[in-house]
Image (cartoon, rainbow, N blue to C red):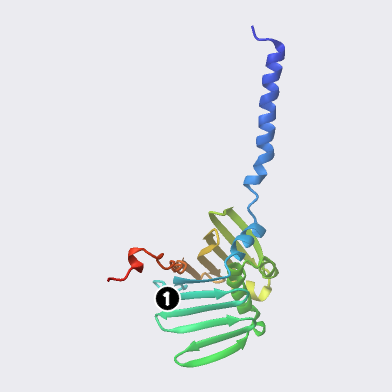
Amino acid sequence: MISGSKIRLDWLCRAVVLALAFCAMPAWAAFDLPELMGLLAKQKSGEARFTEQRFVHGLEGPLDASGTLSFDAPDKLVRRTLSPRIETMAVEGNTLTLSRGGRNRTLALDSMPELLGLVEAMRGTLTGDGATLQRYFKSTVTGAPTKWTLDLTPLDSRLAAQVRSIRISGRASDVLGLEMEFVGGDRSVMNISPNAPAAVPTNAAPSGSAAGRTTP
């Protein structure tokens, strides 16, 4: 026969386990913008390849482009398009330089708030600059460090008149995708493939090893 004290003890143990589980639940949902920015900020520089498809209202198929991306914290970002034609967009600080066909054009980003917001969406994400992102966008993070999504909605009315939303996706400190939906129905989808870090040179073979011996 089971005593009343034994039943009460079992009930109490179950209650404690349930309470602990309930208290632990928020930890699973705690991945947020500051945590994501902390992950991204660890990457001080990087290079990647990209492919992009632009879906334009009225055109039957997408417009394709491909090339390379590179960044150096805190504010340098370079997009070099290799196909369908070679052109480069380089941003450093407040200066934007466009290069095409041997010609360069330099602009001040703050003279074009719409373009500044788009640049800061990418630059702020790559460098883990959450304060800049929140200045220009309403930011929503979903997922987990191993697979996350950052949704950005423009706060600036001039940017919002052109861009409806931006979605950036990635894994840990790597940005893997960028989707933009424009007012009017156009859409851009970019897939990003980060380059592997350069291999660290191995040390010279120790004295006496086969690689270090000379033939008598």
Horizontal side, residue 213 vs residue 2: left or right: left
- Residue 161 shows in the view: no
Q: Secondary structure at mark 1?
A: strand
Give the amino acid type for the residue marked by disc 1 in the picture: Ala
Residue furthest out toward the top: 1
- The residue that appears at 62% across and 59% down in the rendered structure is 36
- The residue that appears at 37% across and 64% down in the rendered structure is 208
Instruction: Name above or below for residue 40 compared with residue 4.
Output: below
Q: Position of residue 198 (x, y in %)?
A: 46, 69
Residue furthest out toward the left: 216
User: Which residue is at the front of the view, 8 or 106?
Assistant: 8
User: Which residue is at the front of the view, 134 or 28?
Assistant: 28
Q: Position of residue 126 (x, y in %)?
A: 58, 68
Q: Quadrant of the N terminus?
A: top right
- The residue that appears at 49% across and 83% down in the rendered structure is 88
For residue 137, what is the image quadrant? bottom right
Horizontal side, residue 153 vs residue 78: left or right: right
Horizontal side, residue 182 vs residue 1: left or right: left
Residue furthest out toward the front: 216
Q: Position of residue 27 (x, y in %)?
A: 65, 45
User: Dot 1: within a 10 Å radius of its alpha carbon, few (fewer than 14), some, or many (20 or more) residues?
Assistant: some
Q: Dot 1 corresponds to which residue?
A: 65
User: Which residue is at the front of the view, 216 or 161?
Assistant: 216
